[in-house]
Image: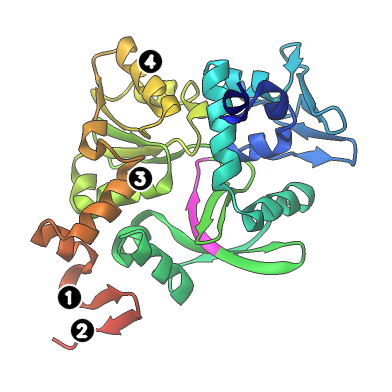
Amino acid sequence: MDNKRTTGLSCERARAFPIEKALAKLGHFPTRETDKEAWFLSPFRSENQASFKVCKKLNKWYDHGQGIGGNVIDLVCLINNLSVKETLQWLETDQISFSFHQQSFFKKENKIGLQILHAEPMRHFGLLKYLFERRISIYTASLICKEVHFINKQKRYFAIGLQNISGGWELRNKYYKSSTSPKDISHFKNGKDKLIITEGMFDILSLLEINKNLKEEYDFLVLNSTTFIKRVMIYLEVYDQVDLYLDNDSNGKLTTENLIHQSNKFKDKSKLYDGFKDVNDWLIDHAKKGISQEAQDVFLLPQKQTCFTPDGCKENKK
């Protein structure tokens, strides 16, 4: 009995999981807050004025627009469309995967907010090295991303940035994963009748790394959060085919299944990275094994001008 009680996250322990942290993990940040409460744009619908309240002392939430509320388990169940058991697993994984450094960064951001300074072509060695670790070339990353500099609590930081259709940014570096308000999808239109949907920026970057001519066949849509899946349906009406490259977790699989049941134009492409969490995990493993010459050449930039190595960018004198 004791072993069963200590295996996994109990409902009692899960209810103590901070709602603000769960919302941050899902890509939602407060528009205003005090020591007692925080207000968010509702994660259940599109709105311009925040109507979603979190009581910090009680760790409870209430959506004034829909007249519903509850604890963190209720919230994650509703947003991710998960069972209680799946939600407990989601919360437990989040506790394990977030380092202390990342958790403290989120707390600072939620309280202070971010101020974007500027965006420019990527050239900082730290970001280039991080791209190499994720097996993404500078050329590929530069197709859709920028080097974004920002201020958080009077300190300057920089990260790889993917801009969304509302002007907000998804921000990533080796130690940091977050986004600015407003949170939204990223949609790249190449004038095609086929679309690729991924959950995050490194998923679409991985696909672009694998196939350099992908934009000649597809438009791209990055959800930045699966909570936006209902919101994007209006964008999908113009496409004849929609290829889904969502994560191989319970939430990603459920989202894929729901879409496929709606229309036969949705295609599940997750078999490409079967056995891995997502496309980027598969790409990293594929590149390390050196399975093919194509995988080895995946980091070489066009026109043989520069080569991305762990030591940085070096001129190719040929």
Mark 4: secondary structure = helix
Judge by depth and name the residue closer to the eye, 71 or 112: 71
Instruction: Return the residue at label 1.
Output: 304
Mark nearer the N terminus (4 vs 2): 4
Q: Which residue is denoted by mark 3 in the rendering?
A: 203
Q: Do the residues labelled 2 and 1 touch (CB within 8 Å)?
A: yes
Label 2, secondary structure: give it.
loop
Q: Identity of the amino acid at label 3? A: Asp
Q: How crowded is mark 2: few (under 14 residues within 10 Å), some or many (20 or more)?
A: few
Gap between marks 3 and 1 measured at Cα: 25 Å
| Residue at the spot of label 4 | 258
Q: Give the labeled residue for mark 2.
A: 316
Given this view, does label 3 or label 2 mark the residue nearer the observer?
A: 3
* Residue type at tag 1: Lys
Q: Residue at x 58, y 17 (%)?
A: 84
Q: Earlier in the sequence, mark 3 or mark 1?
A: 3
Q: Which colouring convention does the figure follow?
A: rainbow
The extreme bottom residue here reads 317
Q: Is residue 111 shown above or below 256? A: below
Residue type at mark 2? Asn
In the image, is 295 to the left or to the right of 277? left
Residue 88's tag is none
Label 4 sits on what residue type? Asn
The answer for how far apart the CA atoms under marks 2 and 1 are is 7 Å
Which residues make up the magenta segment?
A: 159-165
Find the residue positioned furthest to the left: 293
Is residue 31 found inside the magenta-colored segment of the image?
Answer: no
Are the residues tagged 3 and 2 within 8 Å (C-beta)? no
Q: Position of residue 132 (x, y in %)?
A: 34, 66
Closest to the camera, between mark 3 and mark 1, is: 3
* Relative image position of residue 98 (x, y in whole percent): 58, 48
| Closer-to-camera residue (93/283) | 93
